[in-house]
Image: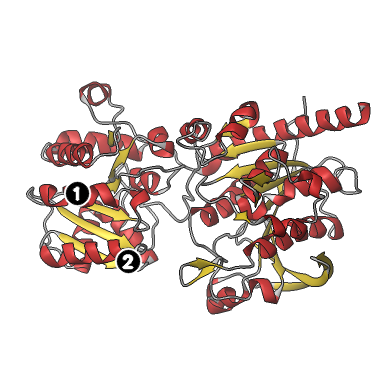
């Protein structure tokens, strides 16, 4: 067994806050790096330098400096130059290396324009994956572990195994591949294979090929020493045909190397006792009057009647059917017959944006819809709502239900993925045991959703019981400390498997 000594960890991701973000991956990348650094490990975060986005919010970012490092990679027979900028994550020892390549990364969005993925996305992220290893070599990072995230870095475990395993600086480097959402796999046509720099022999049904095309997520799964995903329940779900998105066979074959680790939350940013976005702060020890003040402020801000007696249910989400808006639409009029308010914030499917806006117009005293994203308002919805709605079709981990628990806002969730792992349903047994933290339903149906929301509305009418459930949720620890410990354990497993594969290779 390897010791739990200080590790040199390189975490590669396509986005990380505060530099770039389209979703939870950005939050997780940064928060995990902070937690690993706090645990005493040597952590380097490598991301693309989307300079147009960075320049647009330069006053909000730490100072970024050119390292002077330049490198050239052969991409489809052409020489492509790259460079590296760097900075530190504020308040940490985490080094952030930003890979520069203007033609690939100086764009107004990360992955797409006008709703369509950039046609050269395979080339962009194959270059980035290869650049990560080049940077490790030239900057003498000598990683013990390279932690890769989603399809944009799926090529790294393959390159590490097939080309770099015995090269100086990589003698001990193991790979870990984290799957944040199986719906996004990096599927490209087979003629993109030369962009990877890998031999065509690896383009087979067991490693890089899927349905005749190149699949970069499959590539990472096939070659990584260890695989993680973002909740224990999701780890089981993705090994089934229903959840595996076509990769369940490969994942099942590697079940012994697959670990589900529930994400934590960044309690520096999400903490009702210190949150700068709130009109009043509060804590589990003293939730009132701060929580009530936040509710009144939210109602006033979004144009709902100010009342502490009506339950206010919030939802901050991408507007898509995956998030449960289709079943919500089927039961919305039923729910609005009750004394209840809803507040929606997000963007997404234009059809759903229109529907939710029309619902707010039709029920002006009960529904507020804000199309767009506002970080301050997102925090205020978490604090000012009584309950938070997440009726997802699937949800690998989810962060908002943990924010809600932290803020004393009872989650209403479907029993899938990380939602199942983090919320305990309020039923007679759990209420008596004092373990209830929210409301959970099983079947993806409008009837089950409506029944569960109505259970929440009814429980709101029992203030003492509601307070008990709220206090139980607020008392739980959702920081990254536990999650980081599980990742370190996985890194050790990866090092052991890397060692065993190396011995097997020498024996053969």
Residue at the image position 53 percent from the left and 43 percent from the top: 480
Q: Quadrant of the C terminus?
A: top right
Q: Position of residue 209 (x, y in %)?
A: 68, 45
Residue 7 as seen in the image, left or right of residue 274: right
Q: Position of residue 470 (x, y in %)?
A: 27, 39
Q: Tag 1: Cα neighbours inside 10 Å, few (<14), some, or many (≥20)? A: some
Given residues 262 and 363, the one toward you in this image is 363
Q: Which residue is mark 1?
A: 330
Q: Position of residue 185 (x, y in %)?
A: 57, 50
Which of the 4 image quarters holds residue 256? Answer: top right
Q: Quadrant of the N terminus?
A: top right
Residue at the image position 62 percent from the left and 34 percent from the top: 250
SS type, badge 2? helix
The image shows residue 417, relative to residue 382, as above or below, that is above
The image shows residue 186, relative to residue 497, as above or below, that is below
Residue at the image position 83 percent from the left and 44 percent from the top: 162
Color scheme of the displayed model: secondary structure
Given residues 476 and 322, the one toward you in this image is 322
Between the residue at mark 1 and the residue at mark 2, the CA separation in whole angstroms equals 18 Å
The image shows residue 392, relative to residue 79, as above or below, that is above
Give the number of the disc on residue 350. Answer: 2
Residue 499 as seen in the image, left or right of residue 422: right
Q: Tag 2: Cα neighbours inside 10 Å, few (<14), some, or many (≥20)? A: few
Residue 450 as seen in the image, left or right of residue 281: left
Furthest residue to the front? 212
Q: Position of residue 420 (x, y in %)?
A: 38, 34
SS type, badge 1? helix
Q: Is residue 278 visible?
A: no
Give the number of the disc on residue 468. Answer: none
Which of the 4 image quarters holds residue 462? Answer: top left
The tag earlier along the polypeptide, 1 or 2, is 1
Q: Is residue 71 visible?
A: yes
């Amino acid at each position: 067994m390897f010791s739990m000594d200080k590790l040199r960890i390189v975490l590669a991701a396509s986005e990380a806050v505060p530099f770039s973000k389209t979703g939870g991956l950005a939050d997780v990348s940064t928060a995990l790096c902070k937690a690993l650094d706090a645990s005493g490990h040597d952590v380097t975060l490598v991301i693309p330098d989307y300079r147009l986005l960075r320049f647009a919010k330069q006053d909000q970012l730490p100072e970024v400096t050119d390292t002077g490092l330049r490198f050239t990679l052969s991409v489809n027979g052409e020489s492509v130059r790259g460079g590296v900028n760097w900075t530190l994550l504020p308040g940490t020892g985490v080094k952030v290396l930003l890979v520069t390549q203007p033609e690939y990364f100086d764009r107004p969005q990360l992955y797409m324009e006008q709703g369509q993925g950039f046609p050269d996305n395979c080339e962009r992220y194959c270059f980035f994956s290869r650049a990560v290893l080049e940077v490790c070599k030239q900057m003498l990072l000598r990683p013990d572990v390279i932690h890769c995230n989603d399809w944009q870095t799926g090529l790294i475990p393959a390159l590490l195994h097939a080309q770099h395993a015995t090269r100086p600086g990589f003698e001990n480097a193991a790979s870990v591949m984290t799957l944040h959402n199986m719906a996004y796999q990096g599927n490209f046509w087979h003629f993109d294979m030369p962009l990877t720099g890998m031999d065509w022999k690896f383009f087979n049904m067991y490693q890089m090929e899927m349905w005749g095309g190149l699949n970069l997520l499959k590539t990472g799964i096939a070659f990584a020493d260890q695989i993680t995903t973002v909740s224990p329940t999701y780890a089981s779900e993705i090994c089934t045909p229903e959840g595996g998105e076509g990769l369940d066979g490969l994942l099942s074959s590697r079940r012994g190397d697959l670990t589900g680790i529930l994400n934590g939350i960044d309690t520096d940013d999400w903490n009702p006792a210190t949150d700068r976005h709130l009109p009043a702060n509060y804590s589990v020890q003293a939730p009132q009057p701060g929580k009530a003040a936040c509710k009144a402020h939210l109602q006033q801000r979004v144009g709902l009647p100010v009342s502490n007696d009506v339950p206010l249910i919030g939802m901050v989400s991408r507007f898509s059917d995956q998030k449960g808006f289709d079943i919500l639409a089927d039961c919305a009029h039923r729910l609005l017959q009750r004394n209840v308010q809803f507040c929606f914030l997000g963007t997404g499917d234009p059809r759903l944006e229109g529907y939710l806006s029309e619902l707010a117009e039709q029920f002006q005293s009960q529904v507020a819809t804000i199309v767009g994203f506002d970080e301050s308002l997102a925090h205020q919805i978490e604090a000012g709502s009584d309950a938070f709605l997440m009726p997802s079709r699937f949800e690998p981990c989810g962060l908002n239900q943990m924010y809600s628990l932290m803020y004393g806002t009872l989650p209403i969730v479907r029993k899938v993925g990380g939602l199942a792992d983090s919320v305990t349903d309020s039923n007679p047994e759990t209420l008596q045991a004092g373990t209830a933290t929210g409301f959970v339903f099983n079947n993806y149906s409008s009837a089950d959703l409506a029944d569960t929301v109505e259970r929440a509305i009814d429980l709101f009418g029992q203030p003492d019981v509601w307070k008990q459930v709220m206090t139980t949720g607020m008392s739980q620890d959702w920081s990254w400390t536990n999650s980081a410990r599980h990742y370190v354990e996985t890194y050790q497993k990866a090092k052991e498997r890397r060692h065993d594969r190396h011995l097997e290779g020498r024996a053969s």
